[in-house]
Image (cartoon, rainbow, N blue to C red):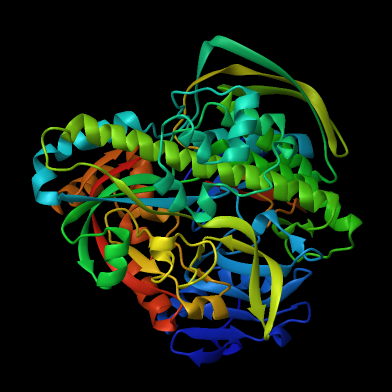
Amino acid sequence: MIQLQAFTRISDYEWEIPKTFRHDMRVPVRVFASRRLLENALGDKSIEQAVNAATLPGLVGRVVVMPDVHQGYGFPIGGVAATRYPEGVISPGGIGYDINCGVRLLATTLEAGEAEPYFKDLIQALDKYCPSGVGAEGGMRLSEAELDQACREGARWALRRGMGSEQDLRRTEEGGCLEGADPTRVSKRAKERGRSQLGTLGAGNHFLEVGIVEQVFDARAAAAMGLLEGCLTLSIHCGSRGFGHQICTDYVQELQGAVNRYGIHLPDRELVCAPLDSPEGQAYLGAMRAAANYAFLNRQLLAHQARLAFEAVLAGKVSNWHLHQVYDIAHNIGKIETHEIDGQRVKVCVHRKGATRAFGPGAPGLPEEYARVGQPVLVPGSMGTASWVLVGTEESMMRSFGSSCHGAGRVLSRNAAKRSVRGEQLQRELEADGILLRAGSMAGLAEEAPSAYKDVDEVVETVCGAGIARKVARLRPLLVVKG
Amino acid sequence: MRSSRTGDRGYREIAHTADWALRVWAPDLKGLLVTAAEGMYDLLGVVTDPNQPVQQHLALEAMDAESLLVAFLNELVFQLEERRAFWQFDLEVKGTQLEGELKGARVIGQGKEIKAVTYHDLAIQKGERGLEVTVVFDV
């Protein structure tokens, strides 16, 4: 196990393992964490996984680790690594099984007090309109041709069917569609899984959450986003469902042979990879983009369905129930971007696994309304705790490949969480705190207990203290729907 | 924590921070595959309807025993989304190939979902109980 002595302290919130720490490291590992969070991270294999990730061919700069890090597969969850394009590698383990798992935030001008009499009806409606839970299927079953088209268009597929707005797409990372998606590189098996799951939330740690803007820290940024203290918000956390999971599974299996063909030696089979400019690398890139677009579309459909739920319950009863998009971000994805490395502009494949893009003011790809404030960074806490809206900074562009944290990160195993609290007890405790809950499974609920996660406030203090994000608003949950 | 023992093979659940893991043992590779499947279904809380039997022919080939185990279990994960689960495995395992018939029934309930079976720390080892392996599932 790696010890604290292996690190050089750069600042209160930055620590580095030099590339001389192990003979096969190609770049150093830079950890953004308070000392307490770093010591916590040393309790599992997450830092060791970051060191393993630092051995991949074509890496540039450093492997970056976020303060919400925990152990993953290959890469830790909460890790960022960039490989030179096109000769560096792309690794499915650096992106994750749930390709484009991410968060969408919508907001209202509706004060929580005005809507409160309808909260019980609203949570029932959200539960009904947004299918969740194990094996959930949506209201639409696409043909293979329709699914291929959806993978090429991403969120725009929903727009063309009247289930979204140009503002929704403008305020989604990459406009809700990665170019270069290649559905021909997606297996029939993945397509079979994906055809009936659009518009569903899934299970596990995915959720819908109605919250309240509890405190605004940056008035100008909050105004740009339409975040008003005391008003309702809606967060959607989910990804590419079985479609994306199957794509990653397929390519983790397929690339096992590729590493031998390209003479790549790996300390961990989950780091399996291929050169970006190889047929295998291009195939995975095309398939990964298809899954990413599926997830953008899925969150767009869920947003539409949630709007229907709000309308069904609140229209005619409150002053203004409308939900406008704040932003939609991915936290498991691979993107081709250009970053400054040692004074030079370098085109790279940025792998973000449990990490969020956090582009600063003036960065390319931001909608005009956010050009001066920076890209919104959405950081959900655990169920029942706070969530945060941050913005990216120029510092993040220079120090973390324009990336920041994605959430709270687990500290307890699922069994330990279930031993610490029963689902029914947790539900009562949350309701006593004024949080209404709909959960498909009490055991699943206990696994997601707040005590199983790190303190999101501490995670946010770290990224802001390090300068790679800036606080905009803190949100408090009111209604939670989970599978 | 779930566990089971049937004669000279068995499984038990072990702690893992974010996901699930099973320690599995059996006298041979075929036994290891079947026991890992049983453990996985147990973790998932799969419930089937014996009045709706299903049958499936399966043929898999992999580069090594670990990959065969991952491919086999991921096949079962896929079949679960097709609402099929199996408890009778009439398989022939030769080296890193398997072929045979699976019999089971339609799934009418399932407590949890697995995203995928991973290669995390996956190494089939010879031990006192024959072959042993720890399988980690991404939840």
Please name the residue shown 67% across and 69% down the image: A82
- Image quadrant for the C terminus of chain A? top left
B5 w.r.t. A52: above or below? above
Q: Quadrant of the N terminus of chain A?
A: bottom right
Tally of marks: 0
Q: Is residue B130 visible?
A: no
| Residue A4 horizontal/vertical position (percent) | 54, 85
Q: Residue furthest toward the top?
A: B51
Report the front residue among A43 and A310. Answer: A310
Along the line of sight, the residue nearer the viewer: B59 or A62: A62
Q: Quadrant of residue A353?
A: bottom right
Q: As displayed, is residue A11 above or below residue A325?
A: below
Q: For residue A298, say whether it is visible.
A: yes
Q: From the viewer's perspective, is A369 left or right of A429?
A: right
Q: Is residue B79 left or right of residue A303?
A: right
User: Residue furthest toward the front?
Assistant: A368
- Could you tell me residue A59's position as x and y percent? 73, 72
- Horizontal relation, residue A359 to residue B117: left or right: left
Q: Is residue A421 left or right of residue A435?
A: right
Residue B54 image-quadrant placement: top right
Counting from the top left corner in percent of width and height, residue A329 is at 47, 55
Q: Nearer the viewer, residue B35 or A201?
A: A201
Residue at the (45%, 56%) spot, across then down:
A413
Q: Indicate whether A117 appears above or below A371.
A: above
Residue A336 x/y as whole percent: 66, 61
Q: Which residue is rendered at x = 57% and y = 68% of the image?
A: A46
User: Which residue does the image show at 61% across and 49% down from the upper left?
Assistant: A178
